[in-house]
Image: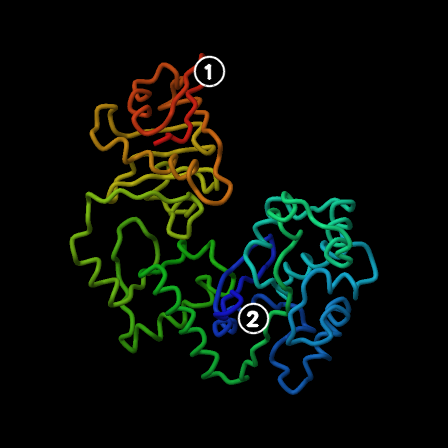
Amino acid sequence: MQEEGFLWVGGEGHRVTFCFESDLDLLQEEIFEEKDLAFNGADRPAEVILQEGSGLLANLFPDSTRRYDLSTLLQMFKGSGAELVKRLWDEVWQGRITNDTFITLRRALMNRFRFPETETTRKLHQRVSRLRRLSLTERKRGPLLPGNWHLVPRPELPNDLLETEERRKDRARLLLDRYGILFRELLQKEWPALRWSNIFRALRIMELSGEVMAGIFFHGIPGPQFISHRAFRRLQQKLPEDVAYWINATDPASLCGIQLDATRGMLPPRIATTHLVFRGKRLIVVSKRNGRDLTLHVPPEDPDLPEYVVSLWHLLMRKFQPVRRISIETINGERAPQSAYVPVLRTSFDVTVDYRNVTLYRKMR
């Protein structure tokens, strides 16, 4: 993010999108909805637009091309550290500023974007004054919000109909690279500029030129479907049925929460603590509440069952915030301690069983 022109941009509802700086024009119209921050005023100085849109930004970012760490911003801000942090995140969700590290966003999510005044002031004061040595724990924890803050670049959009249509085609191409096939329901969770209403006309034009194909490629999907030639060739090949993989229910590739009658009742709700394990196109395991409730669609004697609990292994082994243990309460709707699946779990985890739960720990090798 600091070297390759890759960045994250916030939007309404604490939604975040990731893109390259060169692709910002594909998101620009929907991110910057404020009239004073419209990007079609190429003849207006950036400083004028900045002051009209936000006095805070004009004061904190006097040089719109520079990046500033939190301690520097505090010196220019007339207020408390906690107030500064709150104002910065307000501007983030307006799509105006971002940070050049992902850990800042991750740390803010961990704190639910709330930082106590005493903690904020103390840490910021340490960064500014550097009068005392930090303990080993504080060094490992790092600064409150690391990285550098900067304005989101503002590409100039030519006020030309042909350029506008080409940009809409680029949005469609980006989505086709991501999904292969496009239909209305699939794009409901996308960034506003990338939703169906903003690309449908472009898809029709691309169909007429032969760049994409339209038709019925999957049954159960209402309305038109568009597919790239590359995805169509892939679809004609026999897809592997013996590959096991897992996804989070909120992953962009997940159909959880997509309003399709064909999948209604087959998939769990789109919740971040839900994980799904597939073998080919067959749903094998549904893990809810980070493993507290398991549903397995294979018998306990299935020889590949240890491979199907990979999502639980991930929770215990992931590099960022691994869980110390997983307490399983139910398996296939029954109390976990009485389940026939417990012996299989012992082959992959260190397991303790009490009268209420089956608890999994990382297996020491």
Q: Report, in whole angstroms, how far the alpha carbon at label 1 lies from the one at label 2.
A: 53 Å
Disc 2 designates what residue? 29
Q: Position of residue 131 (x, y in %)?
A: 78, 54
Disc 1 designates what residue? 356
Q: Position of residue 292 (x, y in %)?
A: 45, 28
In the rendered view, how is the structure colored? Answer: rainbow
Q: Secondary structure under badge 2? A: helix
Along the viewing direction, whichever of 231 and 162 lies nearer the viewer = 231
Along the viewing direction, whichever of 278 and 118 lies nearer the viewer = 118
Q: Secondary structure under badge 1? A: loop
Q: Are marks 1 and 2 in contact (CB under 8 Å)?
A: no
The quadrant in which the C terminus is found is top left
Q: Amino acid at mark 2?
A: Glu
Hey, which quadrant is residue 245 in on the image?
top left
Residue 134 higher or lower than 54, as above or below: above
Please give the name of the residue rendered at 56% of the width and 78% of the height, measured from the top-left corner.
155
Of all residues, the one furthest to the right in this rendering is 78
Q: Of callouts 1 and 2, which one flags the residue occurring earlier in the amino acid sequence? A: 2
